[in-house]
Image: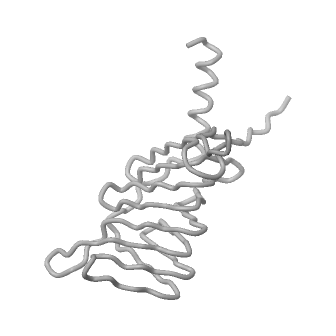
Amino acid sequence: MKPRLALIALCMAYALNAAVGQTSSHDSNAPVDIDADHVEVQDKDGRFVWSGNVRVKQADLLMSAQRLTGTYHMLKGNPQLDRLDAQGGVAFTLNDDNAHGDVAVYDLNRKIITLIGAVTLRQGGNYLHAGRLTYDLVSHHATLDGHGPGIGTQSVGGQEQPGRVTGHFTVPQRQQ
C-alpha cells in the first residue's frame, strides 16, 4: 500500500474507533426489561411479540422499535432469551453511541447486534451511514457495509445494489 493510502486508512480506522467509542464493556448477561403497548405470548413456539412503542433495556443498552419478536427456550422451567428481532424505526443507545435503522437482530447468545436498512451510527458530531451495521458487544468491534436496503445502496437497472459507507467526522480546531 502506498504511504499516502496507508495514512488515509489509518486515519479512517482511528475515526471509526472514535465514532463507535471505546467504552466499558456492556453487561450482556444483565436482565432484559421490555415494555410496549401490547404483547402476545406464543409459548408453544417459544416466541413472544411486543408491539407499539416497544422499549428494551439491558444494563446500559437501550433500544426502541415499533415491533419486537423474541425467541426463547426453556431451562429448568424458566424462559431464556435467545434472540430479539426489532422492526420499525429501530434505535439503539449504548453509552454515548446511538444507531438507527429499519430492522435489528440482537443475538443474545453471540452478543452481536445487526442493524439493517438506512443505518446511521452517531457519536457527537461524527456519523456513519451504511446499509448494515454489525456490532459485537464484547469487543466493541463495529463493521459497516453497503449491503441492505436504504442508505448505502444504489439502484442499478431498477434493482438495489450494495452501496458505499459514508462518514462525517469533526476535526479538532487547531491554532494556526
Q: Which residue is most to the right?
A: 176
Q: Which residue is most to the left?
A: 76
* Numbered circles on residues, count: 0
Q: How is the image coloured?
A: one colour
In front of the other: 32 or 171: 32
Query: Which residue is at a point 83% across and 33% down the rendered structure image?
Result: 175
In front of the other: 172 or 59: 59
Q: Quadrant of the C terminus?
A: top right
Q: Quadrant of the N terminus?
A: top right
- The answer to whether residue 98 of the structure is visible from this angle is no
Position of residue 66 relative to residue 36, above or below, is above
Residue 126 position in % (x across, y down):
68, 47
Residue 14 position in % (x across, y down):
58, 35
In front of the other: 122 or 148: 148
- The answer to whether residue 49 of the structure is visible from this angle is yes
Position of residue 103 relative to residue 21, above or below, is below
Residue 141 position in % (x across, y down):
45, 44
Q: Position of 140 compared to 2: left or right? A: left
Position of residue 65 relative to residue 27, above or below, is below
Q: Which residue is most to the front?
A: 157
Q: Position of 71 compared to 169: left or right? A: left
- Residue 39 placement: quadrant: bottom left
Query: Which residue is at a point 41% across and 61% down the rendered structure image?
Result: 106
Query: Which residue is at a point 51% across and 56% down the rendered structure image?
Result: 115
Query: Which residue is at a point 30% across and 66% down the rendered structure image?
Result: 82
